[in-house]
Image (tube, helix red, strand yellow):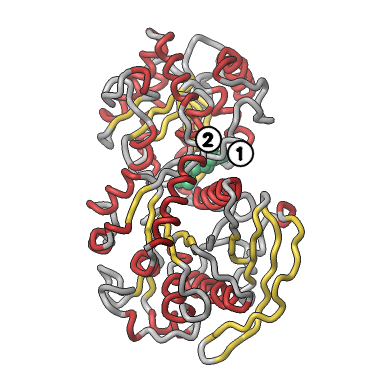
Amino acid sequence: MVSPELAPIAKVGGLADVVIGLSKDLVKKGHNVEIMLPMYQGMRYDMIRDMEEAYAELWVPRYAEWVPEKVFTGIVEGVRCYFFTCGNKFNRDEIYGYDDDMYRFVHFNRSVLEFMKKTDKSPDIIHCHDWQTGLVPVIMYDHYADTGMNKTRAVFTIHNIEHQGQCWFGEDLLASIGMDCGQYYRFDRLQDNIKHNMINLLKAGIIYSNFVTTVSPTYCKEIKESDGKGLEPTLNANSDKLGGILNGLDYEYWNPATDPYLELNYDIESFDKKFTNKGSLRYRLGLADEYRPIVACIARLVPQKGLHLIKHAIYQTLEKGGQFVLLGSSPDEAINEDFRRIANELSDNPNVYIEIGYNEELAHIIYAGSDMLLVPSIFEPCGLTQLIALRYGSVPVVRSTGGLADTVFDVDHSGKGFASSNGFSFCDVNEDGINSALNRAIECWFYHGENFMKLARNGMRCDYSWNNSGNDYVNIYNYIKAH
Ligand code: ADP
């Protein structure tokens, strides 16, 4: 695995969870997995075991010269990891957000391959994640194939096509790692599909890999059809090597039967104990102890998550007699302020709680104590919150897009029958759309309580652990190894 992020030591988003979750499942299935990532200053070093130097002087091209750097190794959650210093390019406070991000990550890509060559690693598969690793397959095929890696195959996973790693000065970017740009400025190679004088690192990963995956079958279809942010022609031209595999959820970490944050642990057999958790959630948040459903929303507050729909849902839930809990935060202070304003406006209402911030413990308690979890995303490559909600018996109310469409099946409209349904969903990105699902969910809770409980239990029976998704990846690895 070559990745820019890894949970729990260097996490910005879901990509970090996928890399550790998939790696652990592959190890469990008997495969040999190693993870390579940059050595960030702000990593959780306390969660890395047996850290030591792996390579003292790795010489890597830097324009016309070669410069030495160090590689370290250690164990994270039982998986061997390698950390690349890349000069001092990752000695900064944040993982992303710098003007030279593209330079930092292509340097990392080049170092990874040089390290593999020097240490005689010739893995069956190199699995790369997002634009930050998009040059790995390119460098491998064009510079290292005759160094013992001619049998190595590349898999590339697109976690979110919004971020593509586009760069105006492609010549200089590639020259910075000792490569000549000439042959790459072509439409069928690295040239950006829309801005022709840019190169596009996500496109590089797509074109040069043996197989490309996205994180759900529906997202795979959506990005080919119209949501590919300019990459639709590339994805369609490569559709015979493109597939969608749902992300799994870490079922050990997210387990209501053992979750240490909960007041009382429960499972499907002891579902009644969930109500103790509902009571303690109310007590903790100062919500009224009345006969009302709790609708929750836990999200990064970014436009992708359907901010105007979240706001509308707060008021709509109150009008329908429910209670609303929002836990979220945004990198954009103006958005945080906007939600704080709503919190102030409703501060006297005992049926609303809004917390702006990141709070892991509270998130667990909300999943366990809520009746419903709202995910009204505009787009959602896979989504984890609805999977966690299902696991904790909180019924998801979602917009039917991407991975949400693949995992939540509407009780009235999915055509699956009651026994195979697990939630409520809607399509239109407007107030009528969200009302059509939210009102049904709240009414079901008030007037058909037995059915609502059955739906929650149906959700708890779903299996979105890594086991199935891990098998899908192994099938792809085997397929490309044999072709
Ligand atoms: P994304 O990766 O787009 O943020 P996902 O649904 O894939 O969305 O993953 C979100 C993860 O982050 C979930 O584990 C969710 O519980 C967690 N999360 C999001 N916001 C918060 C928050 N404010 N506090 C605690 N956990 C949060």
Tell whether circle 2 marks a residue whose Cβ is less than 8 angstroms from ligand 1: yes
Q: Point out residue 378 in the picture as x, y percentages from the top left corner.
A: 33, 42
The residue at 52%/92% (across/down) is 64
Considering depth in this image, is 468 or 381 the residue closer to the camera? 468
Q: Quadrant of residue 322?
A: top left
Residue 52 circle label: none
* Structural crowding at the residue carrying mark 2, measured as other residues with C-alpha within 10 Å and reported as few (<14), some (14–19) or many (≥20): many
Residue 154: % across, % down: 44, 65
Vertical placement of 373 versus 380: above or below? above
Q: Is residue 90 visible?
A: yes
In this rendering, does residue 335 appear at all?
no
- Separation of marks 1 and 2 at Cα, in angstroms: 8 Å
Queried on whether the Cβ of the residue with tag 1 lies below 8 angstroms from ligand 1, the answer reads: yes
Indicate which disc, 1 or 2, sits on the residue closer to the N terminus. Answer: 2
Q: Which residue is mark 2?
A: 327
Question: What x and y, as percent, mark residue 273?
Answer: 61, 15
Q: Looking at this view, name the residue that lies furthest to the front.
A: 482
Which x, y percent locates residue 424? 35, 25
Which residue sits furthest bottom? Answer: 64
**Is the Cβ of the residue at disc 1 closer than 8 Å to that at disc 2?**
yes
Residue 438 quadrant: top left
Give the amino acid type for the residue marked by disc 2 in the picture. Leu
Vertical relation: 344 (above or below) 50: above
Q: Which is nearer the eye, 337 or 408?
A: 408
